[in-house]
Amino acid sequence: METETSFSHVASPIFDGDNYQAWVVRMTVHLEALDLWEAIEEDYDVPPLPANPTMTQLKNHKERKTKKSKAKAYLFSAVSSTIFTRIMNLESAKDIWDYLKKEYQGNERTKNMKVLNLIREFEMLKMKETETIKDYSDKLLGIVNKVRLLGKDFSDERIVQKILVTLPEKYESKISSLEESKDLSSISLAELVNALQAQEQRRMIRKEESMEGALQAKA
């Protein structure tokens, strides 16, 4: 109970109409941690109490009724004001959950179109000269994670290949070095990014040292 109480202070992930797949995963875990998922999954009825209820019956009745109300309240707090106006008249937490699923998850055809658009975006992306390895890899992973959330496989190997063929010319020496020391067809994404970041950092250090030397020479 103490854990549940402390977790209740964790803010619900807010859904504003975008990235439904990511929100629904986070919200499901959030509700499970609060022991409220049953109220959404089953939408059970809470029967009236008998004439002379026992303490156990009173407790169970209150708990089950409270869970339904809490689940609804958490869903209300987990959407933007625009979406709230569309769900505020729905009766139960399950009604709200089902409405959002129907409205934003889309059918298989819609999901496939989203996947195609994301893959097109992935394929067209190239690293800019001023961009860091971290920024570029994060951008690629952001697209890939959206594809995966839509239920489609997307291997890390494909991301590795994408990075290798779209890096600016200044990274060619590092790629050549990696080719000599490793099998690039089996290198992990983390290993590649770390190696490229290390070179990036060394280049930055040399640049700073060069600038300091130039300033000292002028002085």
Image (cartoon, grey):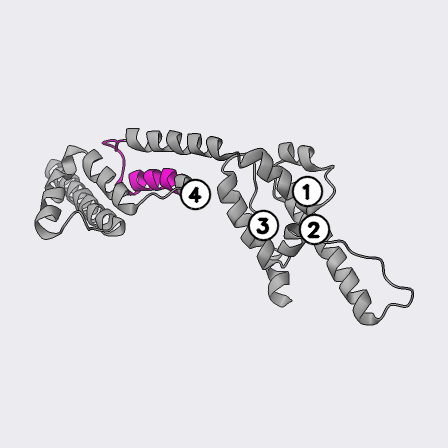
The image's mark for residue 43 is 2
Please name whichever residue, 150 or 79, is drawn nearer the observer in this view of the structure: 150
Percent x, y of residue 67: 71, 56
What residue lies at 43% left-to-right and 33% top-to-bottom?
A: 112
Comes first in the chain, label 3 or label 1: 3
Can you say whether 178 is above or below 80 in the image?
below
**Residue at which label 1 appears:** 95
Comes first in the chain, label 2 or label 3: 3
Disc 4 to disc 2, C-alpha distance? 26 Å
Label 1 near label 2: C-beta < 8 Å?
A: yes
4 or 3: mark nearer the eye: 4
Label 2 near label 4: C-beta < 8 Å?
A: no
Q: Amino acid at mark 4?
A: Gly
Toward the bottom, the furthest residue is: 55
Label 1 near label 3: C-beta < 8 Å?
A: no
Q: Amino acid at mark 1?
A: Asp
Magenta range is 126-145
Please name whichever residue, 196 or 67, is drawn nearer the observer in this view of the structure: 67
Name the quadrant containing residue 79: top right
Comes first in the chain, label 4 or label 2: 2
What residue lies at 26% left-to-right and 31% top-to-bottom?
A: 126
Please name whichever residue, 98 or 161, is drawn nearer the observer in this view of the structure: 98
How dense is the environment of label 4, judged by Cα within 10 Å: few (below 14), some, or many (20 and up)?
few
The image's mark for residue 151 is 4
Comes first in the chain, label 2 or label 1: 2
What residue lies at 68% left-to-right and 36% top-to-bottom?
A: 87
Comes first in the chain, label 1 or label 4: 1
The magenta stretch spans residue 133: yes
| SS class, disc 4 | loop
| SS class, disc 2 | loop
